[in-house]
Image (tube, rainbow, N blue to C red):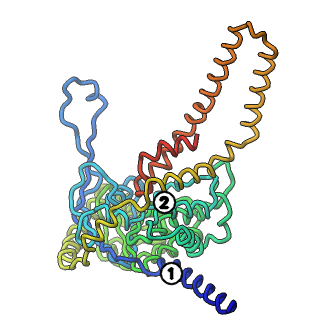
Amino acid sequence: MEEVSDIEIAETRAEDQFKANAIFKVTNQQVVLKFIDVVYTIKLRKVSKLFEKNPSSDDNKVILNGISGMVQPGEMLAMLGPSGSGKTTLLTALGGRLGGHLNGTITYNGKPFSNSMKRKTGFVTQDDVLYPHLTVTETLIFTALLRLPNSFTKQDKIMHAEAVIDQLGLTKCKNSIIGEPFLRGVSGGERKRVSIGQEMLINPSLLFLDEPTSGLDSTTAQRIVSTLLELTEGGRTVVLTIHQPSSRIFYMFHKVLLLCDGNPLYFGQGSATMDYFSSIGYVPSVAMNPSDFLLDLANGDSPNESMKEQTLVKKTLIGAYGMKIADKIKEELQDMSNEPAPDELENKKLAMWPTTWWQQFIVLLQRGVKERKHESFSGLNIAEVLIVAVLSGLLWWKIDISHLQDQIGLLFFTSGFWGFYPLFQAIFTLIPSRTYDARKRTIFGHISALFVFHFKDHS
């Protein structure tokens, strides 16, 4: 009987592990992302207008100008362009995080961005916002406890975090701390994979990444993109910005969007990019990386000797896009039928917080204690308190009971020291804590009211 019981336990564990790994094979719901004539403008005010009593109307600067496209489930779209071309702005707009004067149409399975869609969307920022003194395992487990719904038990959430570690190849460094510039930790590529892992815990249908290969060597960058390519095989829609990929990475992209000063120069299959520019008379003079050639064109550098003026090159490329690509994209967008959207009951369920207020408070308290214990129990802080205690004891040693002023001074010093001592620590903790918690708030990590308790815990 004991052998049978052991076999049943082993089968149950194997089944649970399979379920944990299965969420990374296929997404729960596929998402078709469409964006039509996206235009984004900001207001500019000259310095001289700031001192005028009745300033005239402000000038508008166009950041994005008439960008259209579509990304199907199982596809990866890479947005290329020089610095300031509008890549990050467009990515933020598609991710539902951009405010201001945004015109055009952005739909997800034919519907506008909503709370339910936000719960199915992962967004990896360019800067990895991670707690430096937590290990890789602790980081992902705490994220799982906060972001996975109550339908999962605590053990299920921990199992999901371990499955992410295994899926992203972080097993060797799972017990290493994240680190920071002055604290040795995991490598840059591993940090980026941890950031991706935080989003993968919710099994997103739509994943956005802002320059995931920035600052990484070519081999590490290729591993990151290969991981993203594997994620698309499960029916996910992946959109990323990238600055200058290698030729091997470039041909991994299913679709490419090239931007120049907020204007689209190309949108289509990545493998057909060079053929398109060859058809309009732009052929590289020597064999080179396709992304380098595209960035040269986006900067106005033409391989044609007869066309050296950068402004003219950009206008020619923008005009060619309008004639050969723009109308074709709009026709495809109109002809393509939308995927069925989830029913209203599912929307209401997904719009709720994944965990209760009290559960989030407990998790944040535990995470704060683990993150700050290196400071709270550091030798310097302990020595500081002991030294102050010894000096206070020596100054007020054997004072006469009749000396009331000395006793008042002791009480004043003690209350003042223990009042300002934690206050100074709290001041230096506020700014980094706001950075971390602001990011968690944007991804539905936890409620803003809990920031007060989390901040007190850190301090």
- Residue at mark 1: 19
Identify the image quadrant of residue 260. Answer: bottom left
Query: Could you say where residue 197 lies in the image, as x and y percent from the top left?
Result: 52, 67
Residue 146 shows which numbered tag? 2
Residue 306 in sight here? no
**Number of other residues with Cα within 10 Å of mark 2, as a class: few under 14, some 14 to 19, many 20 or more:** many
Count of labels shown? 2
SS under mark 1? helix
Q: Give amino acid for label 1.
A: Lys
Identify the image quadrant of residue 7. Answer: bottom right
The residue that appears at 78% across and 9% down in the rendered structure is 400
The residue that appears at 48% across and 44% down in the rendered structure is 434
Q: Nearer the viewer, residue 404 or 179?
A: 404
Q: Nearer the viewer, residue 146 or 189?
A: 146
Labels 1 and 2: the sequence-earlier one:
1
Q: Nearer the viewer, residue 130 or 225?
A: 130
Query: Could you say where residue 408 lies in the image, as x and y percent from the top left?
Result: 66, 13
Q: CA distance from mark 1 to mark 2?
A: 20 Å
Query: Could you say where residue 224 lies in the image, as x and y percent from the top left?
Result: 53, 70
**Number of other residues with Cα within 10 Å of mark 1, as a class: few under 14, some 14 to 19, many 20 or more:** some
Instruction: Classify the position of the N terminus by image quarter.
Output: bottom right
Query: Could you say where residue 304 lies in the image, as x and y percent from the top left?
Result: 36, 66
Q: Give amino acid for label 2.
A: Leu
The residue that appears at 23% across and 73% down in the rendered structure is 329
